[in-house]
Image (tube, helix red, strand yellow):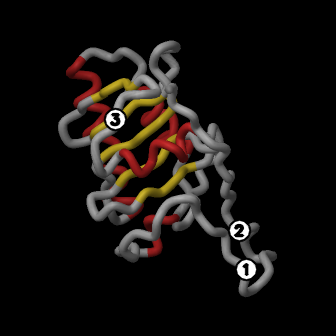
Amino acid sequence: MGFIEGPRRVVRPAAGPGAAPGRSTASAQPAGPPALSRDRYRDRTRELLDSVRRLDAGLNEAAVRELSGWIREQYATSYGDVPVGFVAVCRLGPPFVDHRLSLFHTIIDHFAPGDPMPEPFAAARMLVRSGAYEYVEVYAGGTVLPVLDDGSVVRP
């Protein structure tokens, strides 16, 4: 029997100042520990989005390490916390559908639909497969933060 994936709900951030009070956007993942600071939820810059995308662009090992270091520095200084890695759609084509990027060991693993993804990255997998997000940030405490293609972050 083959793997069957059910439909997923796409979650968008609140409309901002004009959003109705008392309404919240529910997320498809379980709630994680509270954020260390509000900076974690600030919009990601276009430069940062492009850099995360480049991690999977077939760069040599030295270039990947340099880019990973720059991304870690940006997260630490601008957002207050550094994710352990990212899960994103893999653009290599079949049989791969998603991949894992790690900022600390610069590991890039590609996964086919039936391949198990290790924790804590597995919680982000279905969010990425929905196609609604550019990538999903995965933090050491188990928090996953989906990032939209415009750089806005969906709160848990």
* Residue at x 78%, y 76% (from the top left corner): 19
Q: Residue furthest bottom?
A: 22
Q: Which mark is residue 53?
A: none
* Residue at x 37%, y 52% (from the top left corner): 138
Classify mark 1: residues with Cα within 10 Å, few (<14), some (14-19) or many (20+): few
Check contact, mark 1 vs mark 2: CB within 8 A.
yes
Amino acid residing under circle 1: Arg
Picture quarter containing residue 153? bottom right
Work out whether mark 1 precedes mark 2 in sequence or the reverse, and give the earlier one: 2
Secondary structure, mark 2, is loop
Query: Which residue position holds label 1?
Result: 23
Secondary structure, mark 1, is loop
Image: 62 above or below 154: above
Query: Which residue position holds label 2?
Result: 14
Work out whether mark 2 precedes mark 3 in sequence or the reverse, and give the earlier one: 2
Q: Nearer the viewer, mark 3 or mark 1?
A: 3
Q: Nearer the viewer, residue 2 or 88?
A: 2
State the CA–CA distance, disc 3 to disc 1. 35 Å
Residue 9: x and y in percent read 68, 53
Work out whether mark 3 precedes mark 1 in sequence or the reverse, and give the earlier one: 1
Image: 29 above or below 72: below
Picture quarter containing residue 118? top left
Query: Which residue position holds label 3?
Result: 116
Residue 66: x and y in percent read 25, 31
Q: Nearer the viewer, mark 1 or mark 2?
A: 1
Secondary structure, mark 3, is loop
Amino acid residing under circle 2: Ala
* Residue at x 30%, y 28% (from the top left corner): 108
Picture quarter containing residue 133? top right
Image: 143 above or below 86: below
Check contact, mark 3 vs mark 1: CB within 8 A.
no
